[in-house]
């Protein structure tokens, strides 16, 4: 046999070389297979630059910055994904973090080893990517952590997106936005739909930056921000630099996901503090909160338009805020509540307390325009101390909205839809008179009113004695017995309280 082998080797000198190459190829194939299995185990669907979270358990990334999300032993946790994103070079548009958790239904990520890392690089954290899921279905819970001021998600970056989460049980903020041009959409913050227990955060969302979008104008983009211990949304509270031009749009704040039942934030629905400049608050339902629906606490330049404040989402039934509709205070000025265009007026109704309150000597130039204000338990608009502020000759006083005098109605004729009245205020100045109709018997016990339906506006100029008269023929009909009221707004935007009611004849 040895001789035959020797003979074979002599006849085929290349056999050794062929056998060696065969072994090399075989070993190489095994190594490739092992490497591919390792990549499958650690890479977690990085196709298109995405990281995919596939485990609900905790765990740190084994090698941050290598481009893969993997804890020791395999698998990608949410913590590991954030650590990996933070360690990578910043990517324009953000790194996509998707979800592929096993099983169907709601998935609970319970954080146990301390708050998640603050997100310092742009990220697109997309809970809606979870297969077989009606978003939101990924719970981010801080219930197993003990300590004050613990935040669920903290963004310290620009241009990130967070969507599709249920964020509950954080002692600080559910989501803290400490940057610019970030988007928070389609989340339930402060409660877990279907869970019988409230699971509040401290604040639902806190904003410390500019040009951030909370919600949006399309279906599914709005957040439900309810059941929290403090505010639903707070802007620039204690921050040291201006927070400008943030947009809060299309959210339910203080109600359930249907917008029909109260699920109170236990302070105000939204609080915008004195560095929250030029905030746009549009088309939200801000109802059912323990405090005011909206508190502009020193904020300037806000546009508050198209909101339902104290009603259900349809605006047809009461879901009252506990302290009133809107508070404008502590030097909040040059804010616009409502507007002249279709869809801009707010509905401020059914609240326990005033519809809109303006207090503080420097809270001026706040324009209250064409809003539907009715069925609140106190005055529709209240300037300064609670109760009616009487007109004074030539309107020389200062104070909230300069304690602008209101119009005095002298006639309201259902035949011809004619309203007539006078105004006494600062001489030789222009004023806009707005006229409203409300149901019979709806006036405040003081005899002063609110204004459910806008009838029309008239610009008048006072003479040297401070007097002006007006007559307005409304295109909308009103009936005998219904009550007519009016407001006056000066050229800088300071709006008065409602006038005394006048029953139409």
Image: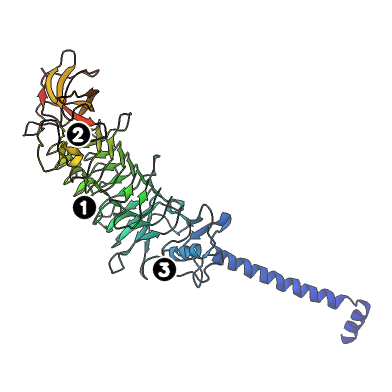
- Count neighbours of disc 3 (C-alpha within 10 A) and say few if under 14, some if 14 to 19, many if 20 or more: some
Residue 428 occupies quadrant: top left
Asked if one can make out residue 10 in the rendered structure from this viewpoint, the answer is yes
Q: Earlier in the sequence, mark 3 or mark 2?
A: 3
Q: Nearer the viewer, mark 3 or mark 2?
A: 2
Answer with left or right where residue 369 lies relative to residue 484.
right
Residue 373: mark in rendering: 2
The part of the image, by quadrant, that contains residue 35 is bottom right
Label of residue 322 in the image: none
- Per the image, label 2 sits on a secondary structure element best described as strand
The N terminus - image quarter: bottom right
Left or right: where 487 falls relative to 195: left
The residue that appears at 90% across and 83% down in the rendered structure is 4
Question: What residue lies at 30% left-to-right and 54% top-to-bottom?
Answer: 204
Task: Tell me residue 277's x, y (percent).
Answer: 33, 47
| Tag 3 residue | 58
Image mark for residue 267: 1
Left or right of 216 in this view: 273: left
């Amino acid at each position: 046999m040895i001789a035959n082998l020797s003979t074979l080797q002599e006849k085929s000198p290349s056999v050794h070389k062929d056998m060696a190459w065969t072994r090399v190829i075989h070993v190489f194939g095994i190594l490739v297979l092992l490497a591919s299995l390792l990549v499958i185990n650690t890479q977690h669907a990085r196709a298109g630059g995405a990281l995919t979270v596939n485990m609900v358990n905790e765990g740190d990334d084994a090698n941050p910055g290598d481009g893969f999300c993997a804890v020791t032993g395999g698998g990608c946790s949410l913590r590991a994904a954030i650590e990996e994103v933070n360690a990578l070079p910043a990517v324009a548009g953000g790194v996509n973090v998707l979800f592929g958790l096993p099983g169907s239904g709601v998935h609970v990520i319970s954080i146990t080893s301390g708050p998640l890392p603050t997100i310092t690089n742009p990220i697109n954290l997309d809970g809606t990517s979870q297969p077989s899921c009606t978003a939101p279905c990924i719970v981010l819970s801080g219930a197993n952590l003990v300590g004050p001021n613990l935040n669920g998600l903290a963004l310290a970056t620009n241009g990130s997106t967070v969507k599709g989460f249920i964020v509950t049980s954080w002692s600080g903020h559910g989501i803290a936005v400490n940057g610019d041009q970030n988007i928070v959409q389609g989340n339930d913050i402060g409660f877990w739909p279907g869970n019988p227990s409230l699971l509040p955060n401290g604040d639902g969302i806190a904003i410390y930056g500019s040009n951030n979008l909370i919600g949006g104008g399309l279906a599914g983009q709005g957040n439900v921000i309810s059941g929290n211990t403090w505010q639903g949304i707070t802007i620039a509270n204690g921050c040291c630099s201006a927070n400008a031009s943030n947009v809060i749009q299309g959210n339910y704040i203080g109600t359930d996901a249907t917008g029909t039942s109260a699920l109170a934030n236990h302070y105000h629905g939204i609080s915008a503090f004195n560095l929250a400049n030029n905030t746009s608050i549009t088309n939200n339902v801000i109802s059912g909160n323990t405090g005011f629906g909206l508190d502009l606490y020193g904020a300037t330049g806000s546009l508050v338009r198209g909101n339902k404040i104290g009603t259900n989402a349809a605006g047809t039934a009461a879901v009252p805020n506990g302290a009133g509709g809107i508070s404008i205070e502590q030097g909040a000025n040059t804010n616009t509540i409502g507007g002249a265009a279709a869809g801009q007026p707010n509905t401020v109704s059914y609240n326990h307390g005033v519809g809109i309150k303006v207090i503080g000597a420097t809270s001026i130039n706040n324009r209250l325009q064409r809003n539907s204000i009715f069925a609140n338990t106190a005055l529709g608009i209240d300037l300064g101390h609670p109760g009616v502020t009487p007109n004074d000759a030539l309107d020389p006083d200062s104070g909230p909205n300069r304690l602008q005098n209101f119009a005095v109605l002298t006639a309201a004729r259902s035949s011809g839809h004619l309203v007539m009245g006078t105004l006494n205020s600062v001489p030789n100045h222009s004023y806009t008179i707005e006229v409203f109709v409300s149901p019979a018997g709806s006036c405040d016990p003081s005899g002063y009113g609110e204004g459910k339906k806008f009838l029309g506006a008239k610009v008048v100029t006072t003479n040297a004695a401070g007097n002006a008269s007006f007559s307005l023929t409304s295109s909308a009909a009103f009936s005998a017995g219904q009550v007519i009221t009016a407001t006056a707004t000066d050229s800088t935007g300071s709006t008065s309280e409602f006038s005394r009611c006048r029953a139409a004849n």
